[in-house]
Amino acid sequence: MLRKRLMGLFVLTVFFASCGNQQNKTNNDKTLDSADHTDAKTEVKTKNILFFGTSLTAGYGLDPTEAYPALIQNRIDSLKLPYKVINAGLSGETSAGGKGRIDWLLKQPVDVFVLELGSNDGLRGLPVAQTIKNLQDIIDRVKAKYPNAKLVLAGMQIPPNMGAQYASDFKNMFPDLAKKNNMALIPFLLDKVGGIPKLNQADGIHPTAEGDKILAENVWVILKDQLK
């Protein structure tokens, strides 16, 4: 009789222990599920910064890692910001050429759009009114496709060989467009670089690697506020 009671107690003990283990397993599974859910919620989505411009953006004559957009990416990475730089610079690009290829580039998500076009128009003496129209068209397409994208415009200047009035109209085009479209403005992309021989390549137009470091600083001063 005693033996039967002891056997019964043993069976009950095993039963409750089993139930307890199962409950702990269930609780542990819930904890793991909760942790996975939290990790998924805290995961930060990487956003795209599209640099759309000329040979100045492409980094003509430089290693791709020396172009100012790549230097901006280095700065972003060092600050652990969730942004990826896309360099869509093209040597010789005019505002008309940019208008022709912007739709293809907008097939990828764009969270910040940096527009650096117009310098080749100015060097060719193309009508400022036409350049304004082309740039506005590009801006309008970006706004239509990504209305929440932050917009940045890189200002440029040209030497007065085309005449003082042309140079003035060209320079004023950028702040006017920026104001009209609520864009952040880089006053002059080549500030502290343009016209300084040691910071430019032999052609006197394209910055050296050292020059591009300064361009990156000129851009970063304005761009950083768009990444908040």
Image (cartoon, helix red, strand yellow):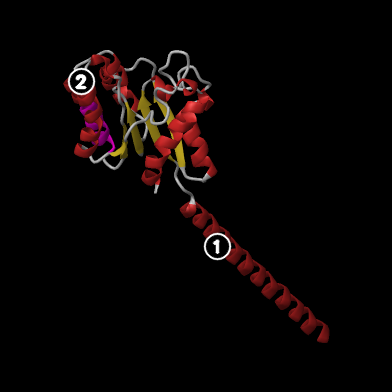
Q: Amino acid at mark 2?
A: Tyr
Taking the magenta stretch, the answer to whether it contains residue 58 is no
Residue extending farthest to the left is 129
Q: Position of residue 136 (x, y in %)?
A: 21, 29
Q: Does the magenta-highlighted stretch encompass residue 138?
A: yes
Q: Position of residue 103 (x, y in %)?
A: 29, 25
Query: Can residue 73 be seen by looking at this rendering?
Result: yes
Label 2 residue SS: helix
Would you place residue 75 above or below residue 86 in this image? below
Disc with the residue nearer the chain's start (2 vs 1): 1
Please provide percent x and percent y for residue 34.
52, 60
Point out the stretch of residues depicted in magenta.
135-146
- SS class of the residue under badge 1? helix
**Label 1 crowding class (10 Å Cα cut-off): few <14, some 14-19, many 20+?**
few
Magenta span: helix, strand or loop, mainly?
helix
Placement of the N terminus among the 4 image quadrants: bottom right
| Amino acid under disc 1 | Lys
Q: Residues within 10 Å of mark 2 (few under 14, many from 20)?
A: some
The residue that mark 2 highlights is: 166
The residue depicted at 40 percent of the width and 41 percent of the height is: 221
Q: Quadrant of residue 138?
A: top left
Marking on residue 56:
none
The reply, left or right, for residue 61 in relation to residue 102 is right
**Residue at (45%, 22%) from the top-left corner?**
207
